[in-house]
Image: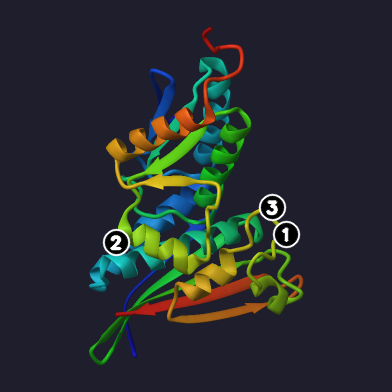
């Protein structure tokens, strides 16, 4: 079965969604990412959606759920690369993603994740004396 | 108003929902829609195709490319023979859901379309028609 690769870079997980996802694949990504956050003790998750031609309510909910689960696991999520037409359509669709932080591109996304991690401080137990 | 192209596609699996999105994209390009209009109708089609699958137990979509004088349009009719909707006004409300979703499918598809019509009765399936004009 096809899967969406999750890359680990330092303390972040990177995902680039490069294909038109059917719903099961979107749900699988949600599960995979959540498990991987725990396995790798990642502090940040960046999801690149620049290749996505649409985001409908199902995909929007998936992004919301990933961000919410990540937050419970002490990781910050940033969605990057949303196309302008997708943004306009999401607003008209009525979908708000209150828990999802966004950035224009990968560079800004990484900077935002770094800031969010710094703001939340080092995880308890990992703090160096 | 003339129908210049017509096709019917089954919606049985979540792969079919993806196929419908890609088909609608192609047809909306043929209609000469702007990128934003393409994105709106494809997103609306995705919502309705998923409804057909999840609430209607599968069905089909009928695609019509329309010409009305100088206007060009795309009309999509999603039909299922599922349980139907008892209270259409309630189903159209934003946030109302029976399927565990966000309840944006019908209301969102309506907002993203120029024309919208729904016909449904308990035990008699559901038919939703949307159209978008250039």
Instruction: Please tell me if label 2 and label 1 are on a single chain.
Output: yes
Instruction: Please tell me if label 1 and label 3 are on a single chain.
Output: yes
- On residue B98, the disc is 1
Apparent side of residue B98 relative to residue B6 in the rendered image (left or right): right
Q: CA distance from mark 2 to mark 3?
A: 31 Å
Residue under mark 2: which chain is it in?
Answer: B
Task: Give coordinates of residue B49: x percent, y percent.
Answer: 52, 60
Q: CA distance from mark 1 to mark 3?
A: 6 Å
Q: Secondary structure at mark 2?
A: helix
Q: CA distance from mark 2 to mark 1?
A: 32 Å
Q: Secondary structure at mark 1?
A: loop
Apparent side of residue A96 relative to residue B18 in the rendered image (left or right): right
Q: Nearer the viewer, residue B84 or B110?
A: B110
Q: Secondary structure at mark 3?
A: loop
Residue under mark 3: which chain is it in?
Answer: B
Q: Nearer the viewer, residue B120 or B4?
A: B120
Residue under mark 1: which chain is it in?
Answer: B
Task: Give coordinates of residue A92: x percent, y percent.
Answer: 46, 69
Q: Dot 1: within a 10 Å radius of its alpha carbon, few (fewer than 14), some, or many (20 or more) residues?
A: few
Q: Which residue is mark 2?
A: B26
Q: Which residue is mark 3?
A: B100
- Which residue occupies 64% across, 74% down? B92
- Residue B89 figure quarter: bottom right
Question: Would residue B10 be seen by someone viewing this image from the given angle?
Answer: yes
- Which residue occupies 48% across, 59% down? B46
């Amino acid at each position: 079965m096809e899967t969406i690769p999750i890359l680990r870079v330092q303390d972040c997980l990177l995902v680039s969604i490069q294909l038109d996802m059917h719903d099961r694949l979107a749900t699988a990504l949600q599960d995979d990412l959540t498990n991987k956050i725990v396995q790798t003790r990642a502090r940040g998750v960046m999801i690149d959606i620049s290749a996505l031609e649409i985001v409908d309510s199902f995909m929007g909910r998936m992004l919301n759920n990933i961000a919410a689960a990540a937050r419970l696991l002490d990781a910050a999520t940033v969605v990057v690369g949303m196309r302008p037409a997708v943004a306009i359509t999401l607003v008209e669709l009525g979908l708000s993603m209150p828990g999802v932080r966004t950035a224009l591109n990968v560079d800004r996304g990484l900077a935002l994740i770094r800031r969010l991690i710094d703001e939340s401080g080092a995880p308890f137990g990992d703090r160096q004396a | 108003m003339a129908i210049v192209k017509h096709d019917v596609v089954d919606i049985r699996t979540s792969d079919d929902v993806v196929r419908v999105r890609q088909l609608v994209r192609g047809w909306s390009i043929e209609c000469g829609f702007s990128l934003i209009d393409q994105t709106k109708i494809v997103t609306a089609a995705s919502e309705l195709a998923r409804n057909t699958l999840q609430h209607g137990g599968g069905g089909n979509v009928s695609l019509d490319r329309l010409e009305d004088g100088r206007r060009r349009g795309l009309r999509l009719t999603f039909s299922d023979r599922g349980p139907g909707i008892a209270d259409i006004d309630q189903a159209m409300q934003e946030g109302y859901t029976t399927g565990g979703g966000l309840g944006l499918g019908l209301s969102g598809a309506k907002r993203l379309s120029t024309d919208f019509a729904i016909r449904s009765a308990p035990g008699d399936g559901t038919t939703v028609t949307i159209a978008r004009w250039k």
